[in-house]
């Protein structure tokens, strides 16, 4: 038996805030690369505020179609489309404490009355599909699931299990280094009934924003001599130099003037994006 793990610590679909995101296409490509068979096990670790319902449904179906035994484990937050995704697993685990939320589909729309009515019809279609996924997992009727969605229902870990939407609670298992979620906390502000305690916690500056935390060694790109159609050695050097400039500014700024949490957050975000691009290049260079 083989075991594999996929980390979904990101917005589902394309993330407008950071330029990142975790799309259904990316998930399907990872599954193809893993080539899991019956008897294998896949662990999907989730910490996500949700995102695009279409991508959520796409990941849900790709997960259900995977022949391996699938376990989805929520590690902190699964809201909106993230709860659609985990319904595709054979077993849903919730690390306690965690927060989960289900709601009706939302969309931004501009146009005349006909366009608005068309958008409303589309949302009804999405709501029906999403409610069907919750219904299959929980045993609740479609109407019961739609009622919970209409209320933008927030659950703690135990409440989600009690609602039949998850199988069991699990205790956090200590790891050498916990993965960092990539989504921007501001996305939570779009939910009208998000718990005040959750909003307040996400609004706090992350503890990792001290300048020393930025002083990490840049990863060395592999196989720099190889040249691909869209990526070459010059790309890697440019990214490395940009990230190093971020480190330099973070180191010098406190000597010149105080650096507030927002400024440090921007520096950290810029550095993380540079790291991510180098990881992408490394993967393409093999």
Image (cartoon, rainbow, N blue to C red):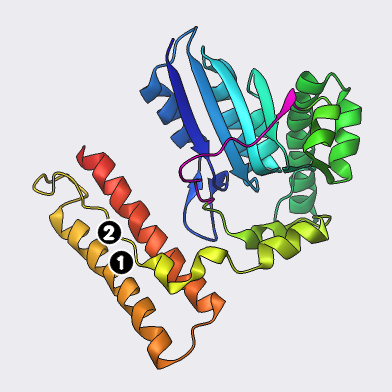
Q: Residue 262: name its quadrant.
A: bottom right
Image depth: mark 1 or mark 2 in front: 2
For residue 112, say whether it is visible.
no
Identify the residue position indicated by label 1 in the image.
243
Asked if marks 1 and 2 touch (Cβ < 8 Å), the reply is yes
| Residue 213 vertical position relative to residue 281 in the rendered view, above or below | below
Which residue: 15% across, 59% down? 234
Q: Among all residues in the image, which is located at the extreme top?
A: 38
Which portion, as a residue range, is magenta?
Answer: 166-181
Viewer-side residue, 165 vs 168: 168
Residue 211 point in image, percent of width and height: 43, 73
Which residue: 70% across, 33% down? 94
Residue 243 point in image, percent of width and height: 30, 66
Residue 218's tag is 2
| Residue 68 vertical position relative to residue 205 in the rendered view, above or below | above
Residue 164's tag is none
**Is 174 included in the stretch rendered in magenta?**
yes
Viewer-side residue, 261 vs 230: 261
């Amino acid at each position: 038996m083989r075991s594999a793990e996929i980390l979904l610590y990101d917005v589902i679909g394309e993330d407008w805030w950071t330029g990142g995101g975790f799309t259904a296409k990316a998930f399907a490509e990872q599954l193809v690369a893993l080539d899991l068979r019956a008897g294998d096990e896949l662990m999907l670790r989730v910490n996500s505020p949700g995102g695009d319902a279409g991508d959520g449904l796409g990941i849900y179906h790709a997960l259900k179609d995977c022949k391996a035994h699938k376990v989805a484990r929520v590690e902190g937050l699964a809201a909106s489309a993230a709860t659609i995704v985990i319904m595709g697993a054979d077993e849903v685990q919730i690390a306690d404490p965690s927060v989960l939320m289900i709601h009706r589909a939302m969309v931004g729309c501009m146009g005349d009355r006909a366009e608005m009515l068309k958008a409303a019809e589309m949302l009804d279609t999405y709501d029906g599909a999403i409610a069907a996924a919750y219904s299959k997992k929980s045993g609740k009727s479609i109407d019961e699931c739609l009622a919970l969605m209409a209320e933008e229902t927030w659950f703690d870990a135990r409440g989600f299990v009690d609602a039949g939407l998850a199988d069991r609670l699990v205790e956090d298992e200590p790891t050498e280094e916990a993965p960092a979620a990539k989504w921007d906390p501001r996305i939570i502000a779009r939910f009208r009934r998000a718990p005040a305690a959750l909003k307040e916690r996400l609004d706090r500056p992350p503890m990792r924003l001290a300048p020393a935390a930025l002083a990490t060694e840049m990863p060395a790109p592999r196989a720099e001599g190889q040249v691909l159609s869209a990526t070459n050695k010059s790309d890697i050097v440019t990214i490395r130099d940009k990230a190093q400039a971020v480190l330099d500014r973070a180191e010098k700024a406190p000597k010149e003037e105080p650096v507030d949490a927002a400024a440090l957050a921007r520096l950290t975000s810029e550095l993380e994006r540079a790291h991510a691009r180098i990881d992408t290049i490394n993967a393409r260079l093999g």
